[in-house]
Image (cartoon, rainbow, N blue to C red):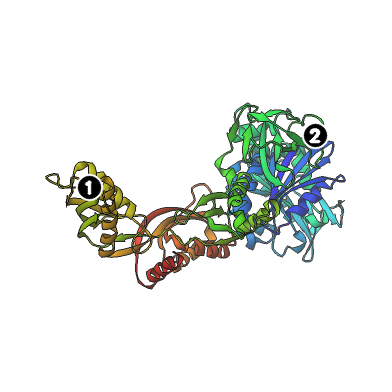
């Protein structure tokens, strides 16, 4: 079986294109994995094919990456408007990182108002590989009515719902066709000395030799071929399918492309939790050995079904696709041998999730169930991770964006009957002291029998940002016995859990300088209590100050939008550090800034609108910074109300 993936921006016509390709020779079978990915299998000229359709939106790049890893080729479906080229930039970047041979299908040519060469030029700004136009459009006024193949030099007239009709090349287009063909041959001559020699000698190369060269170079991923059509009407899809058949690679080349062990026998593409069925995985067989009960990944495949849900009656053909159920030891996004597993390359995993939300069940009875349900969702979703808020302990879903959150809500309700509410993280604020003070604290308690006595004198002082907590002692003469000093330190550390402003205390130092003890009433507990209570009082007196987290953010953004980020980051009280061209992704910049942690949500939402969802953020904690004024007072009041 041959397999290709179709990806592209939302509303570019991907699903329509997949259906049109599948219906070229009659019917096709479809299996849907949630609303993110579907598979269509069909037969074309005696060969079996599988087409993986990945939903648009950059929050689905993780699913697209897994599909590309298991595919022989990829079709990038885009609209004909050059002004929307930036929306295709994330897909071009992923395709080039993957090394999967690519075909560009410029869809909806019946609505095209711009020249095709302008669309190709706009897309070329985001591709290192040359995009080679294989066809030029035939126009009747403003309407595109057909295309001319630049290698075979044949013209085709589109027909509604029927195969295109072979016609003579219109006289008015012969000059344009010859110009475009010359450009095509010049591009191809970079890869073949014989063709270059023919062009220098003004010889016309045979179409068969050009097709052969294109086929060989396509398998080596030397360029991207661009085709035209209207998928909704079936126009141009036959020519695309013909190229896929003659020029795309095969399953045998996948292991080498991914750098997998020679024993790799299958790739798990995608997973879904289906009610009353359990975990279902779409797998591709690389060796023609998978069958019911086959060993895979150190376990056994429980059941193997075809795309239409019927049990697979025999071993899959090489490159075959099937759905594995009752195989919980398998996870999506991995390659498997009979005895083990291999991680796929980093590019296949999509972006690190940066959209964070606290999730709480609407019903208290679902509190314990929610954790397990989220773990199952994360196991099948490459863009989702689950953590806990370190301040509140609540569950935190780390996602790709608002649409991803909506899909998670739908899945929790449909598959687990759990309804949840969400809220933003308040930010991991901290506090510290602003000045050094000397503190004397005596703990004395008499309650019958042995009492409690501990007397300590210590200095509390602020430390540099990031120094954490430091404890030392300069006690002389045994005023505080050495065996009690660790108890004082333990008490001081315990007091750091919640300072006078209600937050964890950081970047302070304590030096124990003096004290007193009682031979009967002193104990570890007494000195720990003295350290705890003395530290609490000292923190109140040492000028407590609120600290807000500052994150270092790297924004991956198409260069066309970089200029607007300066004003955006400044409006979010951030500090611009600069930007540089991405070292490998053409047309992309990496914009660096320092940003208050609580502003990440605003950055995410503003960035989505400004860049039409094409940019994404990598962030990590950098340091804490003092926060004063009304903003600090508001945060303290909210904390007090919450506790």
Could you tell me which quadrant the C terminus lies in?
bottom left
Using the rendered view, name the quadrant where residue 253 is placed: top right
* Left or right of residue 252: residue 572: left
Local packing at callout 2 (Cα closer than 10 Å; few below 14, some 14-19, many 20+) is some
Q: Which is more foreground, mark 2 or mark 1?
A: 1
Q: Secondary structure at mark 2?
A: loop
Q: Nearer the viewer, residue 482 or 10?
A: 482
Q: Position of residue 449 (x, y in %)?
A: 26, 49
Which quadrant of the figure has residue 366? bottom right
Mark 1 residue crowding within 10 angstroms, few (<14) / some (14–19) / many (20+) = many
User: Of marks 2 and 1, which one's residue comes earlier in the chain?
Assistant: 2
Is residue 271 depicted above or below 302 in this figure? Answer: below
Work out whether residue 184 or residue 351 is closer to the camera in this orientation and state it: 351
Q: Which residue is mark 1?
A: 522
- The answer to which quarter of the image holds residue 47 is top right
**What numbered label is drawn on residue 312?**
2
The residue located at (54%, 58%) in the rendering is 357
Depth check, front residue: 392 or 578: 392
Q: Nearer the viewer, residue 416 or 250?
A: 416
x 20%, y 55%: residue = 459
Residue 626 place in picture, x, y as percent: 33, 63
Provide residue 442's location: percent of width, then percent of height: 21, 56
Does residue 458 appear left or right of residue 163 in this picture? Answer: left
Residue 77 appears in view: yes
In the rendered structure, the answer to whether residue 182 lies left or right of residue 165 reads: left
Point out the residue furthest to the left here. Answer: 477
């Amino acid at each position: 079986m041959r397999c290709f993936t179709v990806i592209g921006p939302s509303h570019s016509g991907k699903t329509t294109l997949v259906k049109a390709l599948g219906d070229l020779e009659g019917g096709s079978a479809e299996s849907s994995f949630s609303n993110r990915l579907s598979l269509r299998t069909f037969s074309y000229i005696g060969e079996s094919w599988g087409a993986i359709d990945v939903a648009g939106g950059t929050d689905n790049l993780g699913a697209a990456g897994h599909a590309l890893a298991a595919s022989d080729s990829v079709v990038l479906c885009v609209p004909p408007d050059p002004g929307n080229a930036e929306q295709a930039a994330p897909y071009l970047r992923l395709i080039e990182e993957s090394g999967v041979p690519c075909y560009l299908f410029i869809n909806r040519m019946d609505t095209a108002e711009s020249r095709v060469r302008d669309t190709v030029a706009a897309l070329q700004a985001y591709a290192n590989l040359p995009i080679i136009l294989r066809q030029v459009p035939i126009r009747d006024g403003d309407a595109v009515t057909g295309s001319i193949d630049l290698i075979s030099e044949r013209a085709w007239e589109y027909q509604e719902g029927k195969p295109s009709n072979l016609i003579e090349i219109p006289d008015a287009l012969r000059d344009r066709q010859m110009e475009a063909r010359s450009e095509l041959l010049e591009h191809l001559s970079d890869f073949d000395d014989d063709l270059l020699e023919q062009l220098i000698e003004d010889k016309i190369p045979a179409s068969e030799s050009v097709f052969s060269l294109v086929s060989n170079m396509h398998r080596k991923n030397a360029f991207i071929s661009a085709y035209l059509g209207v998928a909704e009407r079936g126009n141009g899809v036959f020519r695309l399918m013909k190229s896929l058949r003659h020029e795309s690679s095969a399953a045998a080349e996948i292991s080498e492309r991914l750098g997998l062990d020679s024993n790799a026998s299958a790739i798990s593409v995608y997973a879904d939790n289906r009610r009353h069925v359990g975990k279902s995985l779409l797998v591709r067989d690389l060796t023609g050995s998978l069958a019911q009960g086959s060993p895979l990944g150190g376990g056994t495949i429980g059941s193997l079904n075809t795309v239409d849900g019927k049990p697979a009656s025999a071993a899959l053909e090489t490159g075959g696709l099937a759905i594995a159920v009752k195989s919980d030891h398998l996870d999506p996004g991995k390659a498997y041998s009979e005895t083990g597993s291999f991680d796929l390359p980093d590019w296949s995993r999509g972006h690190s999730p940066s959209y964070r939300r606290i999730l709480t069940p609407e019903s208290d009875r679902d509190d314990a169930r929610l954790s397990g349900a989220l773990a199952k969702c994360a196991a099948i979703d490459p863009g989702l991770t689950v953590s806990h808020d370190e301040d509140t302990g609540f569950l935190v879903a780390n996602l790709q964006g608002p649409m991803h959150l909506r899909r998670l809500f739908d899945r929790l309700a449909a598959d687990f009957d759990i309804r949840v509410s969400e809220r933003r993280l308040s930010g991991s604020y901290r506090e510290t002291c602003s000045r050094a003070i000397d503190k004397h604290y005596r703990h004395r308690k008499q309650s019958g029998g042995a009492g409690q006595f501990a007397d300590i004198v210590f200095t509390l002082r602020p430390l540099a940002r990031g120094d954490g907590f430091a404890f030392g002692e300069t006690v002389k003469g045994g005023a505080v016995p050495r065996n009690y000093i660790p108890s004082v330190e333990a008490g001081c550390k315990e007091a750091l859990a919640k300072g006078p402003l209600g937050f964890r205390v950081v970047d302070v130092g304590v030096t124990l300088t003096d004290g007193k003890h009682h031979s009967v009433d002193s104990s570890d507990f007494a000195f720990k209590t003295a350290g705890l209570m003395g530290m609490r009082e000292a923190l109140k007196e040492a000028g407590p100050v609120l600290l807000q987290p500052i994150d270092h953010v790297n924004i991956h953004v198409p260069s066309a939008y970089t200029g607007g980020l300066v004003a955006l980051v400044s409006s979010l009280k951030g500090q611009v550090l600069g930007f540089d061209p991405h070292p490998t992704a053409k047309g992309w910049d990496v914009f660096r800034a320092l940003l208050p942690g609580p502003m990440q949500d605003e950055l995410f939402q503003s960035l989505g609108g400004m860049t039409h969802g094409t940019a994404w953020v990598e962030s990590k904690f950098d340091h804490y910074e003092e926060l004063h004024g009304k903003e600090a007072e508001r945060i303290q009041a909210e904390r007090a109300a919450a506790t």
